[in-house]
Amino acid sequence: MLLSDPLHGPARLLPAEWRDHPEWHRGRPRYALWSIPVECPQALERLRTARELLGDWLRPPGARQAHITLFVCGFPAARPHHDDDIAPAVLEAQRQALDALHLAPFELHIGGLDSFASAAFLRVTDQGQLAHLRRPLGQLSSEIRQAPYVPHLTLGLYRHAASAEDWRRRAEPLRHCPPLALPVRELQLLSYAAAEPQGALRVEARVALA
């Protein structure tokens, strides 16, 4: 549910707990996801402008690089035990499946400001390419997801429990921006240290679009 929807969206922002979450990672060191890197200067400038607009409602972005999540994999584990573990062989099979699509470079479009209850983002739209990429990944592994997939470019997590009405007033200048073209030439398998909120992302594998 999105804050841009006054009828069905959440009533308030949900501040994030800025701490290690051992009950989630259970000592497992890294968490993995397939993603699309965002290096377009215009998109990064809109991201910066949106962060400035929301100001101290957001927690600092930390060291995490701008990216669009394509598919959430889970914790890489040589011997999967928990339901959110994933074997390295499955990750490699996913890489091969993406490579076998022989997908040409394409464009996504970065839109205006929107938000989940817990995180602000810029909208992302496409012409069906993301579903095409997600399909073989989902055939090889169940995605770790609590809500339907919404492509987005995250600004940051909240530390202020403002009302949805207050959020819409503050966000109004950037809610209806013209779309920016984002060239996509590569997919990346990323991981991050599970004990570090907003820690840096590490590239584990790449799939170049032919």
Image (spheres, rainbow, N blue to C red):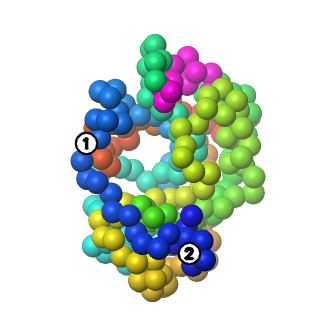
> Residue 33, how many percent across, how many down?
50, 38
**Which residue lies most toward the top here?**
79
Give the CA separation, mark 2 to mark 1.
Answer: 30 Å
Q: Amino acid at mark 2?
A: Ser
Residue segment shown in magenta: 83-94
> Residue 92, how many percent across, how many down?
57, 22
Point 26% across, 53% down: residue? 18
Q: Residues within 10 Å of mark 1 (few under 14, many from 20)?
A: few
- Residue placed under numbered mark 2 in the picture: 4
Q: For the residue labelled by badge 1, is the local secondary structure a helix, a strand or a loop? A: loop
**Which residue lies most toward the left here?**
19
On residue 20, the disc is: 1
Q: For the residue labelled by badge 2, is the local secondary structure a helix, a strand or a loop? A: loop
Q: Nearer the viewer, residue 60 or 20?
A: 20
The C terminus lies in quadrant = top right
Q: Is residue 153 left or right of residue 124?
A: left
In magenta stretch: residue 146:
no
The N terminus lies in quadrant = bottom right
